């Protein structure tokens, strides 16, 4: 857990562009944005992925979804946004600290596989 990049961001050991913070939740701009608004929302507590959500730690998940609309508006995605959490290798999860991508600020393609 000490090597977790998002734990270090939450702790302030690695700088980030903070958008929102409360007792349980931290949100910051993605370093490699794929849309005008691309914010990562994370629990302050280390949870590796969606596979690791349990009855004991799931309280922060409802908190995250309570504040996502506020965060999306703050990030300029008031006209609509998408929430994505990549879980595991096939989904391309690259940071193993649970995070929700809040993406918007422009019209988004409707499908994961646009050629379909
Ligand atoms: P994943 O691929 O795990 O769903 O998403 C990880 C995201 O974290 C990527 O979009 C990547 O750009 C972002 N990211 C990785 N390292 C850093 C960092 O040090 N700072 C910030 N702000 N974002 C990061
Ligand atoms: Zn972590």
Image (spheres, helix red, strand yellow):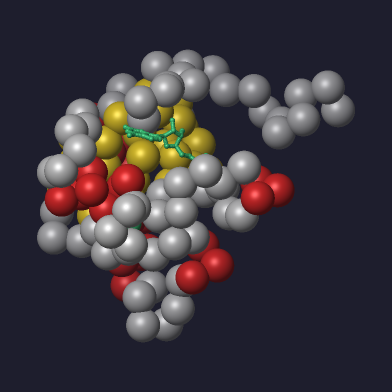
Q: Is residue 59 above or below residue 9?
A: below
Which residue is at a point 64% across and 23% down the rendered structure image?
109
Within the displayed image, which quadrant is ligand 1 positioned in?
Answer: top left
| Residue 97 drawn above or below residue 45 | above
Picture residue at 42% right of the left edge, 22% below the top: 33
Residue 104 appears left or right of 18: right
Residue 34, image x, y percentages: 49, 21
Q: State which quarter of the image contains the C terminus.
A: top right
> Who's the residue at 30% across and 30% down the image?
29
Residue 39 is situated, as x and y percent measured from the top left of the image, at: 35, 34
Residue 75, by quadrant, is: top left
Given the current orientation, which residue lies at the most extreme right position? 116
Q: 77 left or right of 90?
A: left
Look at 35% across and 75% down and name the residue there: 57
Residue 87 shows in the view? yes
Residue 14 lies left or right of residue 89; in this view the side is left
Q: Which is more toward the observer, 108 or 50?
A: 50
Which of the 4 quarters of the picture holds residue 54? bottom left
Residue nearer the viewer, 2 or 80: 2
Q: Residue 88 placed where, x, y %?
A: 61, 54
Question: Can residue 19 be seen at all in this image of the molecule?
Answer: no
């Amino acid at each position: 857990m000490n090597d977790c990049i998002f734990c270090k961001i939450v702790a302030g050991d690695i700088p980030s562009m903070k958008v929102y913070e409360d007792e349980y939740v931290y949100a910051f701009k993605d370093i490699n944005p794929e849309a005008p608004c691309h914010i990562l929302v994370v629990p302050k507590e280390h949870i590796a992925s969606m596979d690791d959500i349990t009855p004991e730690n799931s309280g922060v998940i409802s908190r995250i979804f309570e504040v996502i609309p506020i965060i999306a508006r703050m990030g300029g995605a008031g006209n609509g946004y998408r929430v994505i959490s990549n879980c595991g290798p096939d989904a391309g999860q690259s940071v193993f600290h649970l995070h929700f991508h809040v993406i918007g600020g422009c019209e988004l393609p409707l499908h994961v596989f646009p050629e379909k």
